[in-house]
Amino acid sequence: MKARISRRGIIAMALLAATPAFAQTYPDRPIRLVVPYTAGGPLDVAARAVADGARTALGTIIIDNKAGAGGNIGADIVAKAPADGYTLLLGAVATHAINPSLYPKMPYDAIKDFAPITLIANVPNVLVLNERFAADNKIATVADFVNYAKRHPDKLAYASGGNGSAGHLAGEMLKERTGISAVHGPYKGASPAQLGLLSGDVQFMFDNLASAAPRIKEGKVKALAITTLDTAPAFPDIPTLSASGMAELKDFEISTWFGLFAPAATPKPILSKLHQDFVAA
């Protein structure tokens, strides 16, 4: 009896046979790296840094900012892109861990639709205040800030890079833990949120430390506390929220991670090359 092979089986075997040769010539055209947030924010800065480092091995890497829906729009573009290694995503804790719990309907499956390549960064957030607001109200510590907020209910607003971002959740956690009230102002990315803080449209935000660092050093914002359990080596004088002396903030911990992803069906040899080259970068 002759074995019968379906048309689908023939196609699958052809693809498997072609994969090694394809991987050897990859890449032979520019790679598109989708950043699901606006230009100038921490994810965008990280994407450009790793792209610069990987260009020697991978050639041209084009950064494509596709902001909106808390990062879901950009992530969905990559989830539905051809799985050929030429469309990648720099995702984050929001796109792959937070949003699936916040949005009633997701356009993609954060686990099934992506193949992870490598972790890029794990960065704490920092509670920062508008500098003039802090100076005018003599706010120097977390306790000062919480006491002010309790004396002025519904007078505060805080910015974030969007609904579901780590900055948004940190703000809500602070409110829940301390009992203060503040209105959330979601912006289309971290960079617009920072401008809102600097202009005084909002009084505080939980910013990504890497992104906030220049403004902290220049004295343009007042940094009160780091959101991780350990202090940041670059800013040893900024205490953690957990060590602020307030019992309700003990063990307060939130950080932001960035990770590189490809569409789920991307061939393993290409994923291995991307992993190797981006880790080296």
Image (cartoon, rainbow, N blue to C red):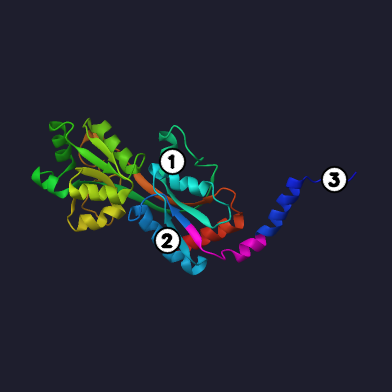
Counting residues from the start of the chain, the first of labels 1 and 3 encountered is 3
The circle drawn on residue 126 is: none
Q: In the structure shown, which secondary structural element does the residue marked by tag 1 occupy?
A: helix
Q: What is the span of residues highlighted in magenta in the rendered image? A: 20-32
Q: In which quarter of the image is residue 214?
A: bottom left
Residue 26, magenta (yes or no): yes
Location of mark 2 (residue): 50
- Residue 142 coordinates in the image, percent (x, y): 18, 41
Amino acid type, callout 3: Ala
Mark 2 and mark 1: span between their CA atoms? 22 Å
Along the line of sight, which residue is nearer the eye, 247 or 140? 140
- Residue 136 coordinates in the image, percent (x, y): 9, 45
Report the residue that reaches farthest toward the bottom. 56
Amino acid type, callout 2: Val
Location of mark 1 (residue): 97
Location of mark 3 (residue): 3
Mark 1 and mark 3: span between their CA atoms? 46 Å
Along the line of sight, which residue is nearer the eye, 180 or 70? 70
* Left or right: 155, with 193 as reference point: left
Tell me what residue is drawn at x 45 percent, y 37 percent: 100
Check disc 3: other Cα within 10 Å, few if <14, some if 14-19, many if 20+: few
Report the residue that reaches farthest toward the right. 1
Tell me what residue is drawn at x 21 percent, y 41 percent: 244
Residue 36 visible in the displayed image: yes
Amino acid type, callout 1: Ala
